Image: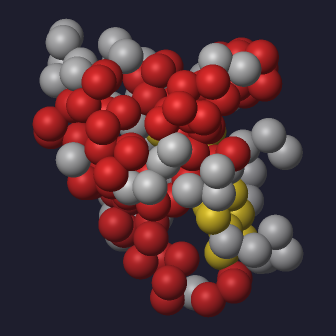
Amino acid sequence: MHSPVIGPASAPVTIVEFFDPSCEACRAFYPIVKQILAQTGGDVRLVLRYTPLHEGSDEVVRILEAARKQDLFQPVLEALLANQPEWAIHGAPDLEKAWEISTDAGLDLRQAKQDAVAAAVDNVLSQDAADVQANNVRQTPTFFVNGKPLTDFSPEGL
């Protein structure tokens, strides 16, 4: 219930994606997931679960949660993914660049910096970390469709 959702709550199909905003494979799969959502109308919804495996990804999750509070989750997510090569440098992420990209997408930086450090965001990160372990998630993206793990990890399998 605490996770970002794209699509209607009443959709008969739910895709749960454990994702890391710094993950190149997550970036590659996002247009495919978005296309599935567009092609199926209200029959599919996407629930995003944070899996910050890369250095700095936890702060980017905080940016996304601040964006969600401002009803800008999807535009900020898409801007961060589109510009991922600029900020998600493995071993040396440029988090100031991630904030800059987010503000270019409409995020109110002053408010977002406050919202990003709220206890509610700590709780989201803690809950998702616990669920990553409980579901034995080892890589991103990891997909579950209506509660079942995706067995054919490919665009066609999804």
Residue 88 versus residue 144 in the image, above or below: above
Is residue 46 depicted above or below 22 in this figure? below
Q: Position of residue 129 (x, y in %)?
A: 65, 18
Depth check, front residue: 120 or 104: 104
Residue 117 picture quarter = top right
Residue 43 visible, this angle: yes
Q: Give the tally of numbered discs.
A: 0
Q: Residue 150, image x and y in percent? A: 53, 52
Residue at the image point whose x is 82% and y is 69% from the top: 9
Indicate the quadrant where residue 155 lies: bottom left
Of residues 140 and 156, the one nearer the viewer is 140
Extreme-front residue of the structure: 110
Q: Residue 124 at what x, y percent from top left?
A: 72, 27
Res. 50 in view: no
Identify the image quadrant of the N terminus: top right
Residue 98 location (% of width, % of height):
31, 33
- Figure coloring: secondary structure
**Which residue sits at x=74%, y=51%?**
147
The answer to whether residue 130 is above or below residue 81 is above
In this view, the residue in front, 119 or 57, is: 119
Task: State whether residue 138 is above or below residue 23.
Answer: above
Residue at horizontal 69 percent and vertical 85 percent from the top: 42
